[in-house]
Amino acid sequence: MKAINAIRMGGVDVLPLVEGGKGVAISNGITAGHWAAAGGAGTLSGVNADSYDEAGEVIRQVYHARTRLERHEELVAYGIRGGIEQVRRAHEIAGGHGRVHMNVMWEMGGSERVLTGVLEGAKGLLHGVTCGAGMPYRLGEIATRYKVFYYPIISSARAFAALWKRTFSKTAEWLGGVVYEDPWLAGGHNGLSNSEDPLAPEGPFQRVLALRKVMREFGLAETPIVMAGGVWWLEEWEDWIGNPDLGPMAFQFGTRPLLTRESPIGDAWKQRLLTLKEGDVFLNHFSPTGFYSSAVRNSFLEELRERNERQVAYSAEEVGAHVVEYGVGPRKRIVYLTETDRERVRAWEEQGFTEAMRSPDSTLIFVTPEKVEEIVRDQVACMGCLSQCRFSNWSQHGPDYNNGRKADPRSFCIQQTLQNIAHNRNDPEVIEHNLMFSGHNGYRFASDPFYGNGFIPTVQQLVERILTGR
C-alpha cells in the first residue's frame, strides 16, 4: 500500500481524508472536531443543526407559527443558531489540528441566509464550506466575503465548468478543492442528471479524469479533487494515489464515520448498519427535492414504493380509453379511468386502500384513510425546509411562496422523518419507519473484519485504520 501523505488543502497541509457531511444532526461538531483532531478535514452539517439548552440537552425544532412563511423564519433561526453552536464545538475539539468544514445543501430552505448567519456568528472558527444538491452559483461569493475556502460538490466535469464560467472564476483564490460525488454510490441525495441512467452506473475514474482535464484548462492543476462516494478501503484506490493524470486527490468518507463512538446516531441505527446486506441500500426517486437519493431499504421506503405502484392515470373528461367514471374525494368529483385501471382500483380498495389522492401528473394514488390523514397533516405543517418542495408545493420565493404545482402525495416530509431518526435514537421502530440515508457500501460493515464482534471504533481509531489502506 502506498503511503498516505499530506496534501495542501485550504492553505495548510492535512491528511487527504475528509469526513462527509450528513445533514439534520448526523455530522455534528463532535464528529467533525475529532476528525480534524486526527489530522484530516472534519465536516459538520449546517442542515438543521442542533442547538442546546442550558442543561446541554438538544432543543427540538418545534414550530409554533401559524403560516408556512412564519415557520420558515423559525427554521432559518434554528439553522443559524445550531450551525454556530456546532462550529464552536468542532473548533474546540480540533484544537488547531486539521480543518473544520461545514456542509450546506444549496436547495435547503434559506441556505444563503443560514450560511451567511453561521459565517458571521462563528468568524475565524471555520476553515471551509462544502456545498452541493443544486448549482451553488453564489457559494464562492459568500465564502470569499468571509475569507473561508469553498468546496463545491459536483457529479460531472460539465457541472463544474458551468459553475466556474459563471461565478467561481471570480473567486478562484478561495476555491479550496472540488468534491466529485459519485451519483451512483454516494449516500443521501445524488447528482444524477436527466441524461444519466440510475440503473447504468459509470465508473468514477474517467469522470474524475475529465474533471481534472477541465480544471487544468482553468489553471487549477494543483487544486485538490475530493473523491466522494464508494470509498471504503484506500488500497482499492491505490492507483489514484499519486497518479499524475489525476493530480492532488483526497478521499471522502461519509458512511464509515456513522459507525464510531462519537457518532450521534443511536445504538439501534448502529446495530442496523452492522447487519446490512448488499442491495439493502438503493437509489430511489421519492425525495421531495426531486433528486435521486440513496437510503437503507426499510418499511418506510417500502411503503413509498407501494404507494407509487398503486397509481393510475385519469382524465378530467371522457377521452380515448378513459371512459369509466370514478368519484374522487369526499364530494366524489367524477374523473375517468380505463376499464383495466378500474379493475386494479377495485382490487386495491378490497385491500383497504380506499382513498384516492391526486398527483400533479394527472394520476391517482390509493392509500388507506389513515395514510391520507398523515399526508395531509404533514403537508399542512410544512415549515419550508427546502427551497422548493414537491410534497407540500412550498417555494421560498414570493409573492405566493408556491412552486406552481399541486402538492405531490407520492413523496413525504423529509424534515420530519430525518428529525425523527436523528433524535429518537434507540427505538428500533423509529429506525424501521423513517428515512435512513447510507452510501451503497454500507453492507461492508458486516464483512469488514475491523468491525468484527460488533466493534465500534473511535474516530481516531477509524482514521488510523484508514491510513493502513484498510
Image (spheres, helix red, strand yellow):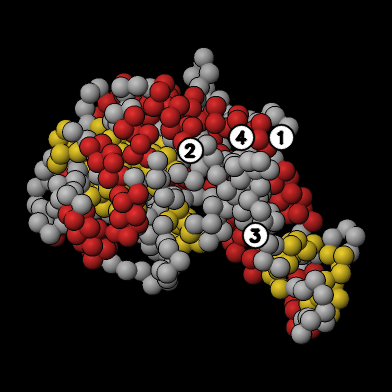
Q: Residues within 10 Å of mark 2 (few under 14, many from 20)?
A: many
Q: Amino acid at mark 1?
A: Thr
Identify the residue at horizontal 35%, vertical 21% (top origin): 123
Which residue in the protein does label 2 denote?
111
How far apart are the alpha carbons under marks 1 and 2?
A: 20 Å
Q: Amino acid at mark 3?
A: Arg
Identify the residue at horizontal 32%, vertical 68% (top origin): 202
Q: Where in the figure is residue 71, as x and y percent of width and height?
A: 65, 33
Which residue in the protein does label 3 denote?
410
- 182 and 265: which is toward the camera: 182
Q: Amino acid at mark 4?
A: His
Q: Amino acid at mark 2?
A: Ser
Helix or strand or loop: what does disc 3 sit on?
loop
Q: Is residue 135 left or right of residue 341?
A: left
Q: Of the residues under marks 4 and 3, which one precedes in the sequence?
A: 4
Q: Is residue 128 left or right of residue 111?
A: left
Which residue in the protein does label 4 denote?
72
Quarter in which the N terminus is drawn: bottom left
Labelled pair 2, 3 in contact (Cβ < 8 Å): no
- 239 and 444: which is toward the camera: 239
Helix or strand or loop: what does disc 4 sit on?
helix
Q: Of the residues under marks 2 and 4, which one precedes in the sequence?
A: 4
Which residue in the protein does label 1 denote?
67
Identify the residue at horizontal 22%, vertical 58% (top origin): 214
Q: Of the residues under marks 1 and 2, which one precedes in the sequence?
A: 1
Helix or strand or loop: what does disc 2 sit on?
helix
Q: Residues within 10 Å of mark 3 (few under 14, many from 20)?
A: many
Q: Is any atom of residue 20 visible in this view?
A: no
Q: Where in the figure is residue 309, as x and y percent of width and height?
A: 64, 69
